[in-house]
Image: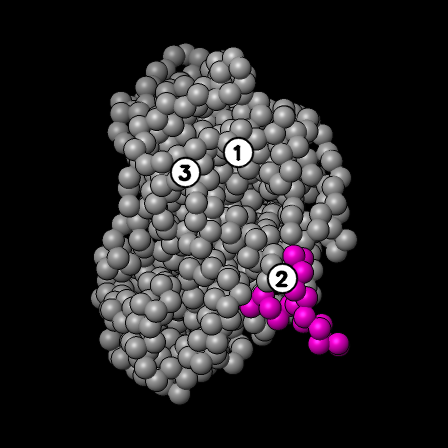
Amino acid sequence: MKFTDGFWRPLPGVEMLYAREAYDVEATEDTLVVTAPTKVIESRGDTLNRPTLTVTLSSPLEGVIGVRIEHLRGARKPRGFDLLGAEEGAAEVSTSEAGGVLRSGPLQATVTAGAPWELRFEAEGRVLTRSGERSVGYAVTAGETYVHEQLALGVGELVYGLGERFGPLVKNGQTVDVWNADGGTSSDLAYKNVPFYLTNRGYGVLVNHTGKVSFEVGSESVEQVQFSVPGESLDYFIIYGPTPAEILERYTALVGRPAQVPAWSYGLWLSTSFTTDYDEDTVTGFLDAMAKRRLPLSVFHFDCFWMREFNWCDFEWDPRTFPDPEGMLDRLHTERDLRVCVWINPYIAQRSPLFDEAAGLGYLLRKPCGEVWQWDMWQAGMGLVDFTNPDATEWFKSKLRRLVGQGVDCFKTDFGERIPTDVVYHDGSDPVQMHNWYTQLYNQAVHDVLVERRGEGEALLFARSATVGGQRLPVHWGGDSTSTYESMAETLRGGLSLAMSGFGFWSHDIGGFEGTPDAGVFKRWTAFGLLSSHSRLHGSGSYRVPWTFDEDPVTGTVDESPQSAVAVTRRFTGLKLSLMPYLYAAGLAASLRGVPMMRPLALAFPDDPGAAYVDREYLLGPDLLVAPVFSPDGSVDVYLPPGRWTDWWTGRVVEGGGWRREQHDFDTLPLYVRSGAVVPVGTRTDRPDYDYLDGLELRVFPGLEAGERRVVEVVTPDGASATYEVVMGTDGHPEVTTSATAPWRVETVGE
């Protein structure tokens, strides 16, 4: 949101007041409290009839400094996020005639006494950013009040994050409104809005408001990031790194890290798609055809029409198409060895038998007049479950427990973005503050049921909407894309942006959601999808079973070559399953440290200016660089950071430090291994959950010099583990010391 018309004037109708000086700075045991008048006080008379802003500094965690800016303290306090890692005693405070200092570990905030206003953040002798003159602002426009802060951007400083956003990865120059919306992947709207960003100067910023936050990232003032919220106060945190990975580690220590996900979830998922016709015979036919073509499958997903039309949600299988759900689910488990996912949303359609029950019990959101809030978008006459009501939440969870008892293993938690603000909540919550937060309560309720019934490490969602805290409830997928190369690229940008926002696991609809992809798009997207953390075949009005893309619609001939959709799906599924010892370890790292599985190059190579803007490729785990192909002719430009890189497919070693143009058939894409990496490879290509230690192969890639060592830890789905220490010998052969008792082998690759 912009308040100014250039440097000198406010916009018409906007009254602006700024913190002009630090009039006094007072210290408590663990805070600094600054009185900041909106005029430099030159006489006693200036203290009268004068708005002041109170700025309070504190620290919830070592290396994190909180700033609260308040005008009228008696106003309703905005809702903040759950700070699970907050602890006391993180701050050291001192004052002097020069001002005040608050230290938290390596991070320091300094308030300079007097005018002009100056709040400086430093670490290890370096200024990270600052809030200077006309940075702390209070605006009145059209009867509404806003508080804003502006933090300085240095020369060459780049901003990342702010949730799953589908435009450029670097956010400089963009206006971003943090307000969850159902807008697809081709707009500036976002399903997952996260008021957190990090920069390449060693720090991140979390605006601690669940409601609407507007960011002007070098767009209103090109020298600053401005963020503003409606109301009378603004809270934010400065989070020190210094590396992007360390910023995310500290940020997720504060707001929570991703839950561990089960090994079976990394395999291939197949969906019914959305509006397609399907019943149990359709499902059985798909599964038989997958098995016949040797396409390993781990999860089958039933989309919306597992329930009867107009009834979403009643949590009842449509008896016309699925007359024996318990028997069907048992067969899928015992005969097919599959996990099962079903679609849900937090809405109750008027025709659902549950609507009157929920409305009568007061479990649905209401209008201020007391009536149930309803509309006809999506489901006719639908209402929304009020998750601020503990009884309503328990009622909703009881419906899910019944499904889990039938044999459902996980839930696709769709929607949760279009949450109205003209409603009354059970607990009196501000509906504007609840708009983004609603999805957290919804997804938490579902996740809690799965933890309760399946256990920690087995609970899994497939969620679309999120905000801060959503990263604790994986997995999330990228929403409604279209079946084009352009949409495939924007989908990846969204995933990388989400990774920079603290989310460790992410997926997308292979082939695109809307429309039907041509064979080329489907095959390129399949390779990309199976080199993502989670991999799902899903569409809207058409199926995504691979063989439908191999038949020529005119001649009827079937492609059975190594370039066919079936062959490409088999090849990349097998590759992913063989990489499970490596991928499972990367997933554990996401849960333990907050580092995402899919890593933008700017995150992995923060000292390489050439990596800063790259948004068409990523690291999968610490050592594999993946560059999806976004062109019909198979040409692709790939950037390799400095160092030696080994082509996964050929073993050829190339020097990085620049761009390469390559040509790829459908059965490959640019897949490079980092210099000196040791990649553990498993023996199975038919399932993701197996004993990774049995027959493990350690692939040692070029780059290890004599005497250099790498330590690889492999953990199996049942918790067994072994450590392998690889030291390069003077003769060029690696020597391995290990605690493993199962058989293993070493393969030296390249050169």
* Residue at x 60%, y 52% (from the top left corner): 527
Which disc number belongs to residue 623?
A: 1
Q: Circle 2: is it few (<14), some (14-19), or many (20+) Cα within 10 Å?
A: many
* Residue at x 71%, y 73% (from the top left corner): 557
Name which of mark 2 and mark 3 comes first in the sequence.
2
| Magenta stretch, residue numbers | 545-563
* Residue at x 36%, y 49% (from the top left corner): 690
Distance, label 1 to label 3, CA atoms, is: 18 Å
Residue 99 seen anywhere in this rendered image of the structure: yes
- In the displayed structure, 390 sits above or below 200; it is below
Tell me the amino acid under the disc marked 3. Leu
Residue 574 at what x, y percent from top left? Answer: 51, 51
Q: Nearer the viewer, mark 1 or mark 3?
A: 3
Q: Nearer the viewer, residue 206 or 648?
A: 648
Which residue is label 2 attached to? 565
- In the displayed structure, 529 sits above or below 608; it is below
Q: Nearer the viewer, residue 534 or 677?
A: 677
Distance, label 2 to label 3, CA atoms, is: 29 Å
Quick check: marks 1 and 3 in contact, CB under 8 Å? no
Name which of mark 1 and mark 3 comes first in the sequence.
1
Q: Nearer the viewer, mark 1 or mark 2?
A: 2
Q: Which image quarter: residue 305?
A: bottom left
Q: Which image quarter: residue 648?
A: top right
Name which of mark 1 and mark 2 comes first in the sequence.
2
Tell me the amino acid under the disc marked 2. Ala
Is 205 on the left or on the right of 152, as rendered? left
Residue 53 at what x, y percent from top left? Answer: 44, 34
Label 1: state its secondary structure.
Answer: loop
Q: Circle 1: is it few (<14), some (14-19), or many (20+) Cα within 10 Å?
A: some
Tell me the amino acid under the disc marked 1. Asp
Q: Which image quarter: residue 395?
A: bottom left
Which residue is label 3 attached to? 696
